[in-house]
Amino acid sequence: MTLFPLDAEPTIPEGAAHVPGWLTLDQQTWIVTQFNQWAAGPVPIRAAKVRGHEMSVRTVCLGWHWQPYKYTRAATDVNGARVLPFPDWLIRLGRRALSATGYADAEVAAYTPDTALVNYYDDAARMGMHQDKDERSLAPVVSLSIGDACTFRFGNTEHRGKPYTDLRLQSGDLFVFGGAARLAYHGVTRVHPHTAPDGCGLDAGRINITLRMTGLKD
């Protein structure tokens, strides 16, 4: 007799929440259409350089442009153009995400993300363990996955090593981390090719959208 089912959800730290299948297929397809428009510019999707090395993940930003390790309105590391504005529907989606993961009504109402980092992973892309700490605000980060599944490693707030938990994030999944887990190290160790569900709008690869409050002003 086993005490726990073999497919039980891995334990994640307090402050983090995983909601599988939160986005419907129709919603995923619509977001992929938006992604294709964002990726075309005015600042095209690109691989940022960290300490002189190009990331395997390609990123397009909304609201504020992220470049290691700061936010700017204009993409001074790409073509100097101003990034697209942050759409109101993503604010509403972010608030729905907080509500779905148990945040109090006041926290939901106050949540006003102003930047999105939209990452595209091909089969070979990875994301090293890192903290999301370029923001002045410690409001929760909302993460949405579309396309191929990935192995997402969510760790502790002190260092990149253990303890950490490996989760399989699939198309449509929601992951939120705030509070005690807001500065946890996290990364993507693997993308699983050919796992995107039919009807999600993406034939290959993975799109990950993270919504954040920067706490910055012009």
Image: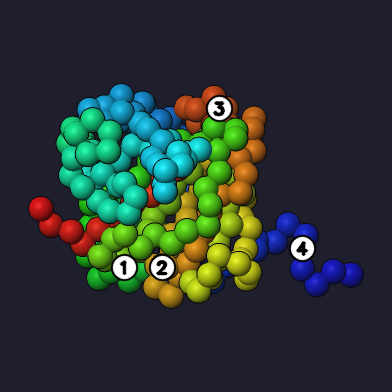
Q: Is residue 13 above or below residue 200?
A: below
Gap in Å between the C-alphas at discs 4 and 3? 31 Å
Comes first in the chain, label 4 or label 1: 4
Task: Find out whether the residues at labels 2 and 3 contact each other: C-beta distance under 8 Å.
Answer: no
Q: Is residue 76 visible?
A: yes
Q: In the image, 49: left or right of 9?
A: left
Gap in Å between the C-alphas at discs 2 and 4? 29 Å
From the image, state whether disc 4 or disc 1 is nearer to you: 1
**Residue 90 appears at what percent x and percent y?**
28, 46
Residue at mark 3: 204
Comes first in the chain, label 2 or label 3: 2
Three-letter residue code for mark 3:
Ala
Q: In the image, 119: left or right of 156?
A: left
Three-letter residue code for mark 2:
Arg
Q: In the image, 164: left or right of 105?
A: right
Q: Is residue 211 above or below residue 121?
A: below
**In-front residue for pair 27/207:** 207
Q: Which quarter of the figure is the N terminus placed in?
A: bottom right
